[in-house]
Image: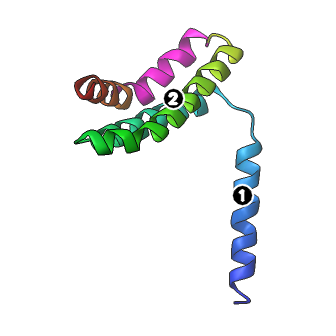
Amino acid sequence: MKKLIPLLTSLFVAFALSSCSKPTHESLSEDMIGQMEELLSVLEGIDDVASAKAAVKDIERISKEMEATREKMKELGELPKDEDEKLKKKYGDRMSEVMSKLVRKT
């Protein structure tokens, strides 16, 4: 137990510091893709009317999170072209994959 307290304290501090950092285009891109993947996971779990009704709250929550992320991206403004290319290279394949899966699910 004595060893567990310092570990939990370290994890808490690391989480608190990471959640306080200013958003960047890269962190927001990662957030958006994660939200899209979460939405896809919810949609993939729908196979009848009951599961569709159960998924509504999750879909609404994810939709609100995605809208908040879009607003943060707008606040940051446009990226310089070289940074935009860097993000496309890093996240483009993952984004394309999740987008195509979402389109097939809807």
Where is residue 10? Give x, y as percent.
Answer: 73, 68
Kindly state the secondary structure of the residue where label 1 is placed.
Answer: helix
**Residue 30 visible in rendering:** no
Q: In the displayed structure, does residue 95 sit left or right of residue 24?
A: left
Magenta-highlighted residues: 79-93
1 or 2: tag closer to the N-terminus: 1
Please identify the quarter of the rendering in which residue 11 is found: bottom right
**Residue 87 visible in rendering:** yes
Which residue appears at 71% of the width and 58% of the height?
14
Which residue appears at 40% of the width and 37% of the height?
37
Mark 1: amino acid: Ala
Please identify the quarter of the rendering in which residue 72 is found: top right
Mark 2: amino acid: Ser
- The correct choice, above or below, for 94 with respect to 8 in the image is above
Task: Give residue 14's mark.
Answer: 1
Q: Tell me, yes or no, whether the highlighted magenta stretch contains residue 40.
A: no
Residue furthest out toward the bottom: 1
Where is residue 20? Give x, y as percent.
Answer: 77, 43
Q: In the displayed structure, does residue 60 sit left or right of residue 52?
A: right
| Residue hosting label 2 | 63
Q: Residues within 10 Å of mark 2 (few under 14, many from 20)?
A: some
Kindly state the secondary structure of the residue where label 2 is placed.
Answer: helix
Q: In the displayed structure, does residue 71 sit left or right of residue 62?
A: right
